[in-house]
Image (cartoon, rainbow, N blue to C red):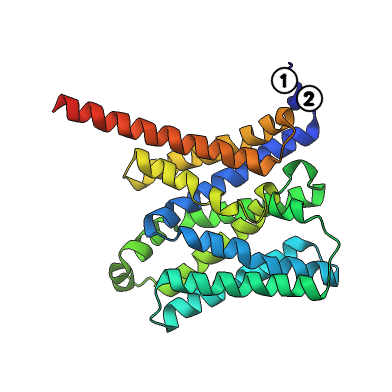
């Protein structure tokens, strides 16, 4: 078996690069989601794009456009309900997830669309067009730039909102900005791993890193490393396995999670033995 064979194809090199970039972006956001206990928000937004995809196909637009609009609308509804009601976060997430997903199924049922559902559910990085690659790069770079500028502010807003308000920071505006970036990230990642596996990419890297360190900056670096490597190597190995790229990427992230878990347990046992 020639292990360098995938690297001889331009489409593989592009797919590996973009998947690694998307993996890093998802991992960066996953650190906040894991620490705040907002993992299910990623699940809600990944399901919320379904009606946007259905409407986009009906009117003849690229489904990334519909997905982006639906994600933005879901973000607004999530934020509005969290601020204006006394409901707990899990209840709000459940309501939004059910509302948007059922709406998408209803739209698709009354106006059937000719689309490969598997490509939306599982994703296929190897089949994306040049235009899709450009969109993914642009969205990823913009999202990472915003993250780099505001991540320290978001730490203060999410974990010490009173201090943030006293410092003249507008917590609501920054929360909305974060969720908009999260929605855009989910739209980008949908191309790589599909709508239903996006939640894994915005949860597992942060969860794995959190097992290894309690400090945010090291956690961010470890999560980004896991996300980038699993994204690029997942596409690479999918060439030999002839399987869905999204499934291979998520499986690799899951392996990283269990390795981190085992490492943590062994380290704790050794520490107890020394004591």
| Quadrant (top left, top right, bottom left, bottom right) of the N terminus | top right
| Residue matched to label 2 | 8
Name which residue lies at 44% across and 76% down.
Answer: 82
Name which residue lies at 39% across and 73% down.
Answer: 88
Q: Secondary structure at mark 1?
A: loop
Q: CA distance from mark 2 to mark 1?
A: 7 Å
Name which residue lies at 70% across and 19% down.
Answer: 3
Q: Is residue 171 above or below residue 38?
A: below
Name which residue lies at 55% across and 75% down.
Answer: 76
Q: Give the class, few, some or many, for how many residues have Cα within 10 Å of label 1's Cα (few <14, many ≥20).
A: few
Q: Nearer the viewer, residue 231 or 263?
A: 263
| Residue matched to label 1 | 4
Q: Is residue 64 above or below residue 246?
A: below
Q: Give the class, few, some or many, for how many residues have Cα within 10 Å of label 2's Cα (few <14, many ≥20).
A: few
User: Residue furthest toward the bottom?
Assistant: 84
Residue 162, picture quadrant:
bottom left
User: Residue furthest toward the top?
Assistant: 1
Residue 23, picture quadrant:
top right
Residue 116 point in image, percent of width and height:
81, 55
């Amino acid at each position: 078996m020639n292990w360098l064979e995938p690297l001889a194809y331009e489409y593989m090199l592009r797919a590996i690069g973009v998947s690694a970039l998307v993996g890093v972006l998802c991992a960066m956001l996953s650190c906040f989601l894991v620490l705040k206990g907002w993992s299910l928000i990623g699940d809600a937004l990944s399901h919320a794009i379904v009606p946007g995809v259905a409407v986009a196909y009906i009117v003849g637009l690229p489904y990334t456009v519909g997905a982006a609009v639906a994600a933005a609308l879901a973000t607004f509804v999530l934020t509005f309900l969290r601020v204006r009601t006394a409901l707990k976060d899990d209840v709000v997430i459940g309501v939004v997830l059910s509302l948007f997903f059922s709406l998408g199924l209803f739209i698709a049922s009354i106006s059937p669309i000719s689309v490969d559902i598997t490509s939306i559910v599982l994703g296929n990085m190897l089949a994306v067009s040049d235009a899709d690659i450009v969109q993914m790069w642009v969205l990823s770079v913009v999202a990472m730039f915003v993250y780099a500028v505001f991540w320290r502010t978001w730490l203060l807003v999410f974990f010490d909102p009173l201090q943030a308000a006293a410092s003249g920071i507008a917590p609501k505006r920054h929360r909305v900005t974060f969720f908009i970036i999260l929605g855009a990230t989910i739209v980008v990642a949908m191309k790589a791993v599909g709508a239903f596996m996006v939640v894994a990419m915005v949860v597992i890297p942060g969860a794995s890193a959190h097992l290894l360190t309690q400090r945010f900056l090291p956690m961010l670096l470890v999560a980004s490393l896991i996300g980038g490597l699993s994204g690029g190597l997942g596409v690479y190995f999918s060439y030999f396995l002839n399987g869905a790229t999204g499934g291979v990427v998520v499986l690799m992230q899951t392996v990283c999670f269990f390795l981190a878990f085992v490492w943590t347990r062994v380290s704790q046992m050794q520490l107890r033995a020394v004591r």
